[in-house]
Image (tube, helix red, strand yellow):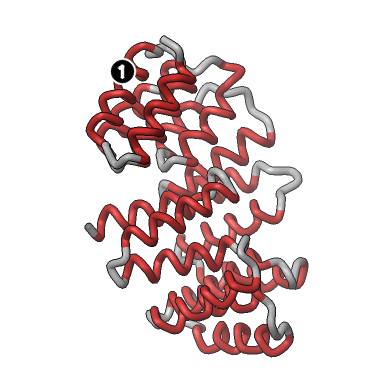
Amino acid sequence: MDKEKVLKEIQSSIKAGNTRLASEQIMALADYFSDDAFTQLTCASLLKVIEDEKGAERIAESIPGKVKDRDRLEAAKGLRGIGFPAEAEKVLSDAAENAEVIRERMRAYFDQRKYAEAIVSYGQLSEPSLEDEIIMVGSVSANKEHTRAAELAKSLLEEAPNDPGVQRCYCAALSAAGRSKEAERFVKDNLKKNRSSPDADALAAYFLWTEGKTTSAGACASKAIKGDPDNTMAMEILAYCLVEKGKLKEAKIVAGAINEKEPGNPAVVRILDMCRIAK
């Protein structure tokens, strides 16, 4: 079987809206390359695209037993990227320990809401990245250690005051701690200091969405995207707002655009899962 040719045929079927044929083609490809973990991963990803969640799950569950030792980290990243963190954790269970493996395991724990385990993994990193620290704050907050999370977020903000991810983390930690008014002041001050800033508008969109103000959040997100078409935070919030308004097709288009800009961005899976639940 010519894999590249079949993949092109699958893409043509998907574009034509023939999901039944696409599903048959994907399963045939998966069966033919049954021992190839990365072809299986591609098939699971394609099944997610056509919203065959059960088929994708069935294939994803088979992948951990097919991954070669040298490919464990790459396969784990792929599985987590398409929304299967439990399988990613299994792939890493026998992986040789190093910083990247610990980092990826922490993300798999976080995506499974195993926050205590994620915190432990963070402690094993000798040189955590900014993203690691953001996940740490999120884990501590989700573990209901709100005071500690807010303190960690404040320290992180002092370290990287202009980083959009850090700013979002700070707002989230404050809101979870019942300090939404402080988060609101921070967002407004940020807008004043950074007029015409897509990042400031995206942060405002995020905060407004968490406050349940969908229309205002969507307006801020749209403004941010107009100023910066590559602003994935704004795109994510816009997609959430579209889902809440029942515009699932439009939300999926936004998810696809995010995936093109940042393959593996977990926001893509979150958006698609929201669309599936909303159907």
Quarter of the rendering occupied by the C terminus:
bottom left
**Which residue is disc 1 drawn over?**
28
**Number of numbered tags placed on the structure image:** 1
Residue at point 35%, 38% (across, down): 14
**Quadrant into which the N terminus falls:** top left
**Residue 173 appears in which quarter of the rendering?**
bottom right
Specify few, some or many for label 1: CA neighbours under 10 Å numbering under 14, 14-19, or 20 or more: some
Q: Is residue 175 above or below residue 78?
A: below
Relative to 147, say whether 275 is above or below: above
Q: Position of residue 174 (x, y in %)?
A: 54, 77
Q: Residue at x 62, y 59 (%)?
A: 134
Residue 243 sits in quarter: bottom left
Label 1: element kind: helix
Q: Residue at x 58, y 39 (%)?
A: 104
Foreground pick, 213 / 133: 213
Residue 189 relative to residue 106: left or right: right
Q: Amino acid at mark 1?
A: Ala
Place of residue 46 in the rendered image (x, y in percent of width and height, measured from the top left): 39, 34
> Percent from the top left, x then y, of residue 196?
69, 82
* Residue at 27 percent of width and 31 percent of height: 55
* Residue 70 at least partly seen: yes
* Above or below 192: residue 253: above
User: Measured along the vertical axis of the image, is residue 67 above or below residue 279?
Assistant: above
Along the viewing direction, whichever of 184 and 114 lies nearer the viewer: 184
